[in-house]
Amino acid sequence: MARAAGTAHGDLVPDPSIQDGRRRKGEKRRRLLREATMRVIEDSGVAAVTQRAVAREAGLPPSAVMYYFPSVEEMLVAALTACNDSYLEELDKLCSMDDASALEGLASLIAGSTTTTRAHIVAEYELFLKAARRPEMRPQIARWMDALDALMARYIDDPVERAGATAAIDGLFLRACIGENPPDAGVVLHVLQSLIRRAG
């Protein structure tokens, strides 16, 4: 069993291996709880998220939930942040491409939303809508809007025109996610190209 190391004066200092193990365990627990939060939202909506419900879904004691997320608000922020991170990671990849490839990639990202289960997508949108009433969640909305605006600035100089285009892109995401006949990547690319031409 690992023990704390001693100093020249006999004081004990934390063993790095123990600290690393605890950190990894904490990160794993947080991830499990974020995922459980999303499943609760998928099944029953944001209003059903409680510490007990998430603990039951994660197969952990309620005390574990309260240790990592002392409030429901913190669980919702963590879940929304994780959702946002995955989308922003994709936008970052697009920013490293040339203009034509980046636009094609954005079209594929939008159309690809249909490959995710509808329940999960609806859960994500519920979280985004919830952020309108929760100040602590709003920075995540700003992160998404800023990242999308930065990407579209490559194509549209005027900020007003660009705001209209990014709003249309949000609409495309929504239609691709929940529409009965979602557009494919080719259709989405055509729409994006039309938005850019009109803005120019």
Image (spheres, helix red, strand yellow):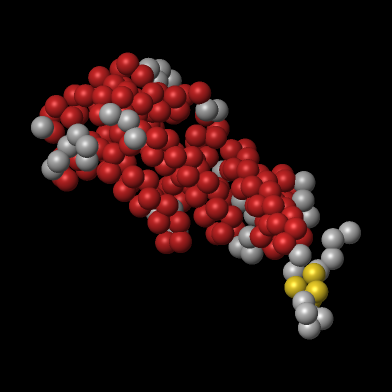
- Taking the spot 19% from the left edge, 29% from the top edge, the residue there is 195
Which picture quadrant has residue 174? top left
Which picture quadrant has residue 178? top left
Question: Could you say which is closer to the camera, residue 136 or residue 94?
Answer: 94
- Taking the spot 38% from the left edge, 50% from the top edge, the residue there is 143
Of the 4 image quadrants, the one containing the C terminus is top left
Residue with the most extreme left position: 200
- Is 2 placed left or right of 24 in the picture? right
- Taking the spot 42% from the left edge, 61% from the top edge, the residue there is 135
**Vertical position of residue 137 compared to residue 57: above or below:** below
- Is 116 placed left or right of 155 in the picture? right
| Residue 161, horizontal then vertical, whole percent | 16, 40
**Vertical position of residue 28 compared to residue 11: above or below:** above
**Vertical position of residue 169 compared to residue 84: above or below:** above
Question: Could you say which is closer to the camera, residue 142 or residue 93?
Answer: 93
| Residue 153, horizontal then vertical, whole percent | 22, 40
Residue 133 in view, yes or no: no
Which picture quadrant has residue 44? top right
- Is 122 placed left or right of 97 in the picture? right
Of the 4 image quadrants, the one containing the N terminus is bottom right
Residue with the most extreme front position: 8
- Is 96 placed left or right of 127 in the picture? left
Residue with the most extreme bottom position: 9
